[in-house]
Image (cartoon, rainbow, N blue to C red):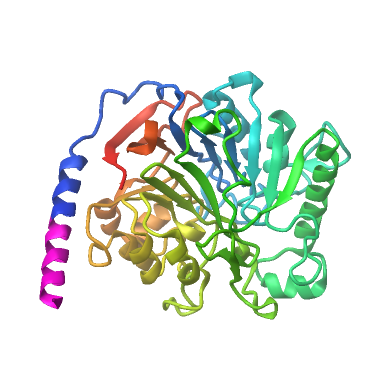
C-alpha cells in the first residue's frame, strides 16, 4: 500500500512539473509596453503597490467592492531610510508614499476620481504597514493632527470601513502606551518611544475625526467570512469570500467561526505576530496574505509553536501568497511552505534583508513541494542581490515593480502582470500565465 502511494505521488509530481513547464511558456508579450487592460466586472484584481516605503495592496473584488490592505510610510528622517540598506521612494520623491498610493488607486480604481474604499485594513501597527509621524508629516485638512500612510490616503480617498487588530481598546494585555507594553512588544534598539507614541496618538485622533465623517471602525473578527464581503452584487458571486484567518493573537480553527489563542497574553513575542491574515477565495482560486507573522525561532530553526505553524493547516494550499514579514529570516518555515505551497510567491520588500538567503531556498525548493515557482519582488535591492548571488537569477521571476494578480471570471484562471514602478504611467513590463487555479 505504501509503495502504491509513493508511486502515485511520484507520478503526480511529474505531471505537475510537466504542466508547469507548459504553462510557463504561455507568457503573453502583447501587453508589454501598453496600459494594463481595465478591470472588468467579474475580475478579481490584487495590486501590490511599490512605493519603497512599505506594504500596500489595493484589491478590486469581482463586483467592484474595494479593499486596501496596509499603507506603509516609513519616515524620511530615519537615519537608515536614505541609505543603500533601504529602497528608494518610487517613482520619485516628489510625493510622499501616501500620495503615491492615492495616485495609484485613482489610476486603477473602477470609479477613478470619485474613488472611495469600501474597506481599509491595517495588519498591525508598524510604520511600514500603516504610517509613521515625524516633524515633516503634513497636517490634516479635517482635524488637528498629522497625517501619513493610511491617514493621508483617507484624506483624499474616503474609507467607508476601517479594520485594525485592536479597536477600540488597543490593549493586549496592557495599554499600548504603557511602559510594560512597550518593553514587551518592541526592542529598545529598534523602537523609538516618542515616534510610536506620536504616531499612535495621531492615528486615534484620525479615527475620532473620520468617524464624524461617517467612517466605521472595527476590530478584526477572526473566523468571520462576513466582515469583509461583496457590497454591490454579492448574489452574482457566491464562490467569492474573504476569510479572516488570524489577528490580534487569535486564529480561526477552520470550523464555523470558532477560534483559538495563538499564545498566552504574557508570552506575546511582539507586534508582528499579532498581524491580521486573510485568505481571499474566488472559485478554485485562493490567495493568502499574513502581515509579519513568523515561523522560525531566534536561531532560524522551525518553531512548531509559532504562528505560521498554527495557522498553516487552516490556510491550506493556495495559488498565490505574499511572503510573511517580507521574507525575513524568522519567516516561511519549512512546514509553512510545504503546507500552503503556492505557485506564486509575492515579496513586498523595502530593505536589504528582504529576503533572507535561507528563506529564498525554502520557497524555491521543489523538494518541499513540486512544480515551477513564480517568485516576484516589488523591490530587490542591489545589496541583497550581491549577498545572495547567482541564486537570485535562478529563483526570481521578477525583482522590481508593481505586481498585479488578475483572476478571471469564476476564478478558474489567473495571470501575474508586472507594471513599471519608475513612471506614473505604470505600463506593463511582463505578463505570466494564464495559470489554472487549483
Indicate yes or no whether the magenta region holds residue 159. no
Residue 310 seen by the camera: yes
Viewer-side residue, 335 vs 425 = 335
Q: Which residues are magenta?
A: 1-14
* Residue 198 spot, x, y in % from top left: 81, 54
Please check the rendered image and state whether residue 10 is part of the magenta-colored stretch, yes or no: yes
Q: Is residue 90 visible?
A: no
How many circles with numbers are drawn on the protein? 0
Q: In this image, 223 relative to 396: left or right?
A: right
x and y percent of residue 38 in the render?
44, 22
Q: Is residue 203 above or below residue 186?
A: above
Magenta segment's dominant SS is: helix
Residue 320, placed above or below residue 231: below
Image quadrant where residue 260 sits: bottom right
Residue located 49% across and 71% down the image = 310
Residue in view at x 71 percent, y 29 percent: 156
Q: Nearer the viewer, residue 296 or 137?
A: 296
Question: Does residue 217 appear left or right of residue 387 in this picture?
Answer: right
Amino acid at each position: 500500500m505504501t509503495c502504491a502511494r509513493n508511486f502515485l505521488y511520484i507520478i503526480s509530481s511529474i505531471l505537475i512539473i510537466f504542466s508547469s513547464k507548459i504553462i510557463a511558456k504561455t507568457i503573453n508579450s502583447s501587453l508589454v509596453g501598453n496600459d494594463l487592460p481595465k478591470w472588468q466586472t467579474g475580475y478579481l484584481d490584487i495590486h501590490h503597490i511599490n512605493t519603497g516605503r512599505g506594504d500596500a495592496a489595493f484589491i478590486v473584488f469581482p463586483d467592484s467592492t474595494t479593499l486596501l490592505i496596509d499603507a506603509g510610510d516609513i519616515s524620511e528622517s530615519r537615519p537608515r531610510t536614505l541609505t543603500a540598506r533601504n529602497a528608494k521612494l518610487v517613482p520619485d520623491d516628489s510625493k510622499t508614499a501616501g500620495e503615491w498610493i492615492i495616485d495609484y488607486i485613482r489610476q486603477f480604481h473602477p470609479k477613478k476620481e470619485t474613488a472611495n474604499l469600501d474597506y481599509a485594513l491595517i495588519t498591525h501597527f508598524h510604520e511600514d504597514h500603516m504610517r509613521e509621524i515625524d516633524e515633516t508629516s503634513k497636517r490634516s485638512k479635517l482635524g488637528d493632527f498629522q497625517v501619513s500612510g493610511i491617514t493621508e490616503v483617507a484624506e483624499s480617498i474616503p474609507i467607508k470601513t476601517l479594520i485594525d487588530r485592536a479597536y477600540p481598546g488597543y490593549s493586549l494585555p496592557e495599554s499600548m502606551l504603557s511602559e510594560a507594553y512597550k518593553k514587551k512588544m518592541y526592542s529598545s534598539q529598534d523602537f523609538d518611544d516618542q515616534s510610536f507614541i506620536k504616531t499612535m496618538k495621531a492615528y486615534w485622533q484620525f479615527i475620532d475625526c473620520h468617524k464624524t465623517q461617517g467612517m466605521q471602525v472595527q476590530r478584526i473578527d477572526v473566523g468571520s467570512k462576513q466582515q469583509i464581503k461583496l457590497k454591490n452584487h454579492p448574489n452574482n458571486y457566491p464562490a467569492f469570500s474573504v476569510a479572516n484567518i488570524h489577528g490580534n493573537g487569535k486564529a480561526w480553527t477552520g470550523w464555523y467561526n470558532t477560534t483559538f489563542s495563538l499564545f498566552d497574553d504574557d508570552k506575546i513575542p511582539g507586534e508582528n505576530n499579532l498581524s491580521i491574515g486573510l485568505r481571499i477565495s474566488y472559485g478554485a482560486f485562493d490567495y493568502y496574505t499574513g502581515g509579519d507573522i513568523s515561523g522560525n525561532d531566534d536561531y532560524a530553526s522551525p518553531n512548531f509553536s509559532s504562528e505560521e505553524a498554527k495557522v498553516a493547516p487552516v490556510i491550506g494550499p493556495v495559488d498565490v501568497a505574499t511572503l510573511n514579514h517580507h521574507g525575513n529570516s524568522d519567516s516561511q518555515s519549512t512546514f509553512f511552505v510545504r503546507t500552503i505551497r503556492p505557485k506564486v510567491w509575492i515579496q513586498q520588500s523595502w530593505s536589504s534583508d528582504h529576503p533572507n538567503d535561507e528563506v529564498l531556498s525554502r520557497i524555491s525548493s521543489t523538494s518541499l513541494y513540486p512544480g515551477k515557482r513564480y517568485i516576484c519582488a516589488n523591490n530587490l535591492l542591489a545589496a541583497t542581490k550581491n549577498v545572495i548571488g547567482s541564486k537570485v537569477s535562478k529563483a526570481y521571476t521578477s525583482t522590481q515593480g508593481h505586481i498585479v494578480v488578475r483572476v478571471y471570471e469564476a476564478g478558474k484562471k489567473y495571470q501575474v502582470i508586472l507594471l513599471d514602478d519608475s513612471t506614473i504611467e505604470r505600463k506593463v513590463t511582463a505578463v505570466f500565465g494564464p495559470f489554472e487555479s487549483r
